Amino acid sequence: MQKELVINALKNQMDKHLTAEEILENIKKVSKDISQATVYRILSQLSTSGVVRKYIGADNKKACYQYVDSQHKCNMHY
């Protein structure tokens, strides 16, 4: 259930690179039953498995994530 919340939050904004905090904020509008640590853990798993792409910002501090869709090609990067 929580993994699906994270995936749906990313799918709903496929044209954007979202931080974990933004993803959590979007999920909290639907469900209060998820923590920031859980979002980070799920994003790590999804990134490792290739379901999401992880981008590191120019400041090397904040990572952004984007859902990988074989139908939707992303030519823009954070």
Image: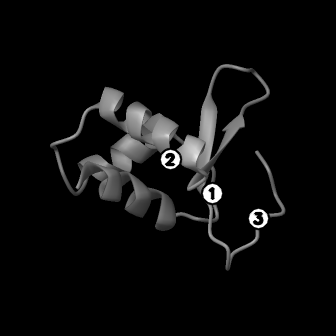
Q: Is the residue marked by circle 1 packed among few (<14), some (14-19), or many (20+) residues within 10 Å?
A: some
Mark 2 or mark 3, which has the lower sequence index? 2
* Residue 46 disc label: 2
The first of marks 3 and 1 along the sequence is 1
Mark 2 Cα shell of 10 Å, populated few (<14), some (14-19), many (≥20):
many
For disc 3, the marked residue is 74
**Residue pictured at 26% horizontal, 49% vertical:** 2
Residue 32, compared with residue 59, is above or below; it is below
Q: Quadrant of the C terminus?
A: top right
Residue at the far right in the pictured view = 75
User: Quarter-wise, where is residue 30 in the image?
Assistant: bottom left
Q: Residue at x 43, y 32 (%)?
A: 40
Residue 51: image location, x then y, percent: 56, 56
Which numbered tag is attached to residue 16? 1
Of tags 2 and 1, the one toward the viewer is 2
The front one of 73 and 16 is: 73
- Residue 18 seen in the figure: no
